[in-house]
Image (cartoon, rainbow, N blue to C red):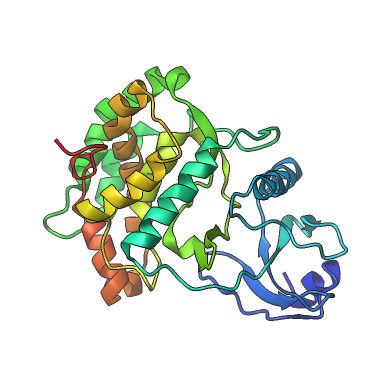
Amino acid sequence: MPADGLATAFALRTLDDTSLSRWSSVYRAVAADGSPVVVKRAASPRERAEALAAWTRAAAAEGISVVVPHETGTRNPQPIGEDWWVAYPFVEGRPYAADAEDLRAAGVLLGRLHASDLAEDGLRRYDWDGPDESGVEDDLETLADILPRDAVVAEVGRVWRDEALPALRAAREELPVAMVSSDFKAANLVYTDAGPVLVDPDNGGVEPRIFDLALAVVLFHNESESAPGRLFTADEWDVFLSGYLSQVTLTARERELWPAALTHMLWEEGSWALEDNDAAAWAHPRQGAFLRDLARTDAARFPLSRS
């Protein structure tokens, strides 16, 4: 998308056409009113893009710290070419500090997202037919050349295929759903004096809430230069979980299926992260250490309570 096309569509004063992210199209800009904004490719199609915008506005009105589309004086979000785009205010703040206070605040925010009871019309629903258990061995063959020797990914993949996914599918009607971010990680949070703000809600949809909690376990420290090169420690997980559980009471069925949900995300999202990162990421001191730790992780490492 040419910079001048975005600038015209959103009536921007200026726009930097160098993306802030290597994973997606995200550009710094200045709106017509002089406010700093970011313009990014949004969810598609129209119904989902507009539903997400409506959901963020409703969530913010309830005091949930999430960005909402900026009042640019133009349609926002809007289609430009074949894609939908959205302009958000640039949130001033600091990155995650990887301490107990920031961890608990992040857990509280995730819990508040899951506890909200807002309209879900038009939002993406979880695709239970999407996970394909038939390709585990092919995926493991692809991963074989990049995994450390002590990786447990193969065992995770086979447990997912043979036990976790069948159990989750059988219980699908029993799992409470919520509006989830599907990308709740430190790199997508900006910490202000009032606490963390979710600045990338565009992967959001309606899914079993324990999937989103499990995804945070798997990817919270991924792609964040301010995070340590590993997943949560046991103490960090306790702090994050305590913040989450201050807002959400998990059902007995969710607790029973937690290991399956975590295995599900370790395989579905964890194996994707392992494969999608290039050689430079694996060689990077922090990101490479995170990926090696992820490759050595199974569901037993993150219980909902210590015995």
Please say whether residue 63 is visible from this viewpoint.
Answer: yes
Image side of residue 220 versus residue 147, left or right: right
User: Split into 4 quadrants, where in the image is the N terminus?
Assistant: bottom right
Picture coordinates of residue 75 (x, y %)? 85, 57
**Residue drawn at point x = 88 percent, y = 64 percent:** 73
User: Split into 4 quadrants, where in the image is the C terminus?
Assistant: top left
User: Closer to the camera, 192 or 163?
Assistant: 192
Image side of residue 158 versus residue 279, left or right: left
Picture coordinates of residue 283 (x, y %)? 27, 75
Task: In the displayed orientation, state which residue is furthest to the right.
Answer: 73
**Residue drawn at point x = 58 percent, y = 54 percent:** 65
Picture coordinates of residue 66 (x, y %)? 60, 55
Picture coordinates of residue 202 (x, y %)? 61, 52
Q: In the rendered image, which quarter is residue 260 located in?
A: top left
Q: In the rendered image, which quarter is residue 9 located in?
A: bottom right
Tag count: 0
In this view, 60 is above or below 119: below
Q: In the rendered image, which quarter is residue 31 located in?
A: bottom right
Task: In the displayed orientation, state which residue is furthest to the left.
Answer: 150
In this view, 64 is above or below 87: above
**Residue drawn at point x = 33 percent, y = 22 percent:** 252
User: Closer to the camera, 62 or 2?
Assistant: 62
Image side of residue 236 versus residue 191, left or right: left
User: Closer to the camera, 171 or 67?
Assistant: 67
